[in-house]
Amino acid sequence: VLYVTRVQRERFEDPSEYEKVKGSYIVNTELMKEAPSSTIVMHPLPRVEEISTDFDSDPRAAYFRQMENGMYVRMAILSHVSAERFIAC
């Protein structure tokens, strides 16, 4: 599993330090040619520049499935919490 996140601008005290590392790594089709076919690429989304859109159609790109599954989990949690609150009323 390759879990990618963005370089977080808000973590840098000096904006010039952020500018130095911003875009220093980008997951793209060319880079992933070196990775095994069993690799799974995950990302919390939204992305900035850290994953190229040319990689989106690769079967190893799991971030859209990850996002969809997260949505269903949040829906289930909200449903469960709402049901408990409704029953308690």
Image (cartoon, rainbow, N blue to C red):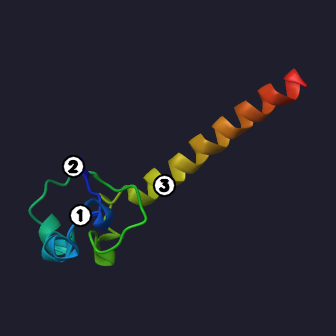
Looking at the rendered image, the disc whose residue lies closer to the viewer, 2 or 1, is 1
65 or 47, nearer to the observer: 47
Regarding mark 1 in the picture, which secondary structure is present there? Answer: loop
Q: Quadrant of residue 61?
A: bottom left
Residue with the mark numbered 2: 38
| Sequence-earlier tag: 3 or 1 | 1
Regarding mark 2 in the picture, which secondary structure is present there? Answer: loop
Residue with the mark numbered 1: 12
**Which disc is residue 67 wearing?**
3
Q: Is residue 3 above or below residue 24?
A: above
Looking at the rendered image, the disc whose residue lies closer to the viewer, 3 or 1, is 1
Percent of width and height locating residue 29: 20, 72
Q: Residues within 10 Å of mark 2 (few under 14, many from 20)?
A: few
| Sequence-earlier tag: 2 or 1 | 1
Tell whether 67 sits left or right of 55: right
Q: Residue furthest front?
A: 13
Percent of width and height locating residue 85: 81, 29
37 or 43, nearer to the observer: 43
Q: CA distance from mark 2 to mark 3?
A: 20 Å
